[in-house]
């Protein structure tokens, strides 16, 4: 009988325990909360950008050729006119020597014609003229003597006529040689020679220019921050050889997503960081707003310009940088963590703690920082808003609130 009572008691205890477990209400889930508080909110717009020199000029090859020597290294500071790259100049040297020879020959021809022609030919004509002048004078004297003798009857008229014919013939030859001497250099010949000289000098100038173009020089003072060519490379005319610019002051091109452009204006402070030097900070200021929105991958962005001092040259042109624009500062703003914001349909809001239950409240949100959001309506200071948890939340849910630290 005792055993029977013991078994019955044990059965009753187990049944009572099962019934208690079945009827026991589960403990509400723990949910972290944060309180709405009034503080100074700094609205930061975070995006990315690219560093470029504040001013720069490209250096391009004026003619095709093979790179014989690279005279500078990337990062070198150069003066205007400094040699950057030397192209193979053998063809240009040959052309220049030929042009110089043609020009000298043309100058010599002009000098010769300006003096009246070739010296030997001129001397021969002058000698012939002098000889004919003597013969002419003798013929004239003979004719005069015979004329006197004919008047006295001491000579025949036929002899006088022959003497006069010889004088006329000598005079005719003398005049012909004088005309030949005068015509030795015609004006048209001299003009033609001068035209050939001008052509030769123009060809010489072109050859000198092509020779100089084999020496590719810096167009301005600055730093050679881009130098893509190497010794032995073949360059086509117009190919990029280098970029020379001012890199102690940089232009930061900031890519701002189209919906965020309304938060940006000229004069806003900008902080620049670079992943390669994570401990460094560069300060800048927005100087120019975009004139258009352009596609960049899957984004539509406006290119905002900011100017940044880079005195130690640590930030290289072309670097992809991280950008923080201090877009807005709101004093005494009512803020909650951005993580507390949720969307239900078209409403943006948060779950607010009332007693031990959640109540959904639609909120009007203003400016945001990296972690907080300004609440313009829907909450009052001290209201507790639910932070994210691993389980779904819903209005009316009973919860066990957990606040950071010792906050209640």
Image: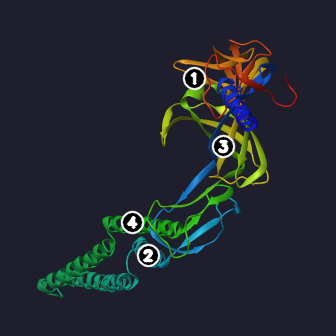
**Label 4: how many Cα within 10 Å (few below 14, some 14–19, many 20+):** some
> Which residue lies under the disc numbered 3?
251
Q: Confirm or deny contact between disc 4 and disc 2 (CB under 8 A).
A: no
**Residue shown at the point (62%, 17%) measured from the top left:** 395
Which numbered mark, 4 or 1, is in the foreground of this view?
Answer: 1
> Which residue lies under the disc numbered 1?
343
Residue 295 in percent (x, y) is at 47, 38
- First in sequence: mark 4 or mark 3? 4
Q: Confirm or deny contact between disc 4 and disc 3 (CB under 8 A).
A: no
Which numbered mark, 1 or 2, is in the foreground of this view?
Answer: 1
- First in sequence: mark 1 or mark 2? 2
Say whether residue 305 is left or right of residue 132: right
The CA span between labels 4 and 1 is 82 Å
- First in sequence: mark 4 or mark 1? 4
> Which residue lies under the disc numbered 4?
199
Q: Is mark 3 on a helix, strand or loop?
A: strand
Q: In which quarter of the image is the N terminus?
A: top right
Depth check: give the residue in front, 277 or 249.
277
The CA span between labels 4 and 3 is 49 Å
Which numbered mark, 3 or 1, is in the foreground of this view?
Answer: 1
Q: What element carries label 2?
A: helix
Report the disc number at residue 95.
2
């Amino acid at each position: 009988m005792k055993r029977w009572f013991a078994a019955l008691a044990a059965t009753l205890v187990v049944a009572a325990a099962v019934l208690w477990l079945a009827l026991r209400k589960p403990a509400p889930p723990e949910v972290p909360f944060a309180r709405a508080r009034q503080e100074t909110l700094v609205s930061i717009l975070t995006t990315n950008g690219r560093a470029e020199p504040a001013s720069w000029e490209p250096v391009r090859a004026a003619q095709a050729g093979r790179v014989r020597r690279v005279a500078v290294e990337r990062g070198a500071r150069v003066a205007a006119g400094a040699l950057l790259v030397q192209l193979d100049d053998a063809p240009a040297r040959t052309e220049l020597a030929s042009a110089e020879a043609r020009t000298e020959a043309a100058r010599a021809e002009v000098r010769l014609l300006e003096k009246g022609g070739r010296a030997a030919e001129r001397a021969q004509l002058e000698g012939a003229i002098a000889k004919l002048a003597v013969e002419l004078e003798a013929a004239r004297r003979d004719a005069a003597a015979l004329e006197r003798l004919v008047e006295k009857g001491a000579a025949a008229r036929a002899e006088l006529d022959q003497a006069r014919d010889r004088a006329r013939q000598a005079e005719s030859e003398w005049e012909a040689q004088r005309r030949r001497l005068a015509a030795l250099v015609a004006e048209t010949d001299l003009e033609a020679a001068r035209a050939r000289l001008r052509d030769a000098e123009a060809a010489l100038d072109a050859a000198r220019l092509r020779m100089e173009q084999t020496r590719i020089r810096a167009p301005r003072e600055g730093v050679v921050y881009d130098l893509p060519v190497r010794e032995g490379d073949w360059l086509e005319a117009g190919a990029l050889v280098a970029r020379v610019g001012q890199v102690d002051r940089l232009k930061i091109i900031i890519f701002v997503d189209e919906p965020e452009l309304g938060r940006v204006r000229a004069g806003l402070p900008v902080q620049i960081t670079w992943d390669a030097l994570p401990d460094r900070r560069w300060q800048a200021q927005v100087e120019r707003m975009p004139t258009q929105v352009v596609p960049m991958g899957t984004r539509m962005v406006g290119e905002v310009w900011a100017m940044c001092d880079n005195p130690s040259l640590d930030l290289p042109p072309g670097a992809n940088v991280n950008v923080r624009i201090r877009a807005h500062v709101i004093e005494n703003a009512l803020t909650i963590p951005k993580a507390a914001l949720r969307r239900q349909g078209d409403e943006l809001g948060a779950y607010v703690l009332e007693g031990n239950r959640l109540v959904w409240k639609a909120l009007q949100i203003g400016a945001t920082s990296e972690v907080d959001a300004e609440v313009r309506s829907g909450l009052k200071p001290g209201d507790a808003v639910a932070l994210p948890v691993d389980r779904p939340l819903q209005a009316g849910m009973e919860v066990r609130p957990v606040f950071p630290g010792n906050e209640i």
